[in-house]
Every structure is written in structure tokens, then in C-alpha cells.
Amino acid sequence: MNQPLLEFEYERALEMITLGSQEQYSRLQAMLTVHGFILTAFGVLLTKNIHNLRTLPTIAILVFGIFLCERWLEFVEHGSETQKHFREKAIEIEKSMEGSSKLFTTTNFESPRFHEISKNLIKAFQVLYIVLMISLLLLWCRELDIKFFISVIH
């Protein structure tokens, strides 16, 4: 392959790596914002419906949060695979280029573990939503037991 074409492809690969990194950070910020809204909405619903916890919106919020976590995990995996592809492409091009700086091939360039941190954060939100659901179920069971006990006494 001719040198100008290799340089052009190399520049595009570096641009895609940069763009992918920016997307990952933007996704993380969006995810944290959305989960903040979900938890706020849950808190508002919970405090307004403390005596009637069996409302559909309260459960729907938690189910939506869990569903959103699953989708976000897919986004993180896709972003990670895309980054890996373009890093490998840049290394491949560097090996073919004459007189290049060999950014990827001469350094011990380790891909950032950002996607692992993102995945762990998403899993933490999933656990939080599941714990909140279990807590609600336990409250409902307790409420049902009290109502049953009161009906038996009367």
C-alpha cells in the first residue's frame, strides 16, 4: 500500500479511537444522570405512597432501571469492542508505515479499563434496584401480615 494512503487510514483510526473515548465518557455521564432521575422519582413516589406501596409506578421505576442497566451494558460492550478494533487497526497500519512514530507498536499501550469501571458501576445500580425491589416486597409482606392479623382479631 502507498504511504499517503496508509497515513490517511492511520489518521482515521486515531480519530475513531478518540471519538470512541469521547462517546464512552458521554455515555457514562448520561447514565449517571438518568439513574439520578430514576432514583429521585422512586424516592418521590415512595414518600407520597408510603401507605400504599403497591402502586404500579413504584415498581415500574425499578423495573425500568434494571432494563436500562441491561441496555447500558450492551452499549459499553459495543463501545469497548469498537475501541479494540480501531486500536488493532492502528497497530496493523503502524507496522506497514515507513518512518512513523509507532505510537501503538513501540509502547506498551494498554487499553484503558474504563469499560470495566463502567460495567461495574452499572452492575452496582442493578444491585441497588434489586435490593430496593426486595425491600418493597418485604414491606408489602409485612403490611399484608398486619392487615391479616387485624382482620383476624376483629
Image: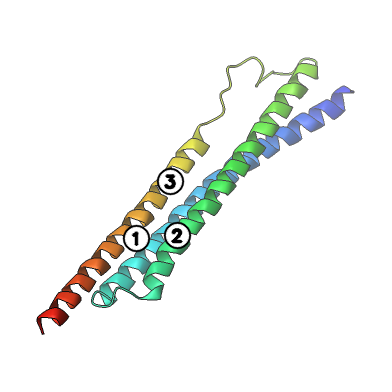
Query: Is 98 located above or below residue 27 in the figure?
Result: above
Q: Is residue 2 left or right of residue 90?
A: right
- Residue type at tag 3: Lys
User: Residue drawn 48% across and 42% down?
Assistant: 119
The residue that mark 1 highlights is 133
Tell me how the rendering is colored.
rainbow
Q: Which mark is residue 65?
A: 2
Q: Is residue 1 left or right of residue 9?
A: right
- Distance, label 1 to label 3, CA atoms, is 15 Å
User: Where, quadrant-wise, is the N terminus in this rendering?
Assistant: top right
The residue that mark 3 highlights is 123
User: x and y percent of residue 43 in the render?
Assistant: 31, 67
> Of circles 2 and 1, which is in front?
1
Within 10 angstroms of label 3, few (less than 14), some, or many (20 or more) residues? Answer: some
Q: Which mark is residue 103?
A: none
User: Residue drawn 43% across and 41% down?
Assistant: 120
Task: Name the residue at the right extreme.
Answer: 2
User: x and y percent of residue 128 in the render?
Assistant: 35, 53
- Residue 37 appears anywhere in the view: no
Between 9 and 86, the residue placed more toward the observer is: 86
User: Residue drawn 32% across and 54% down?
Assistant: 131
As helix, strand or loop, the secondary structure at mark 2 comes to: helix
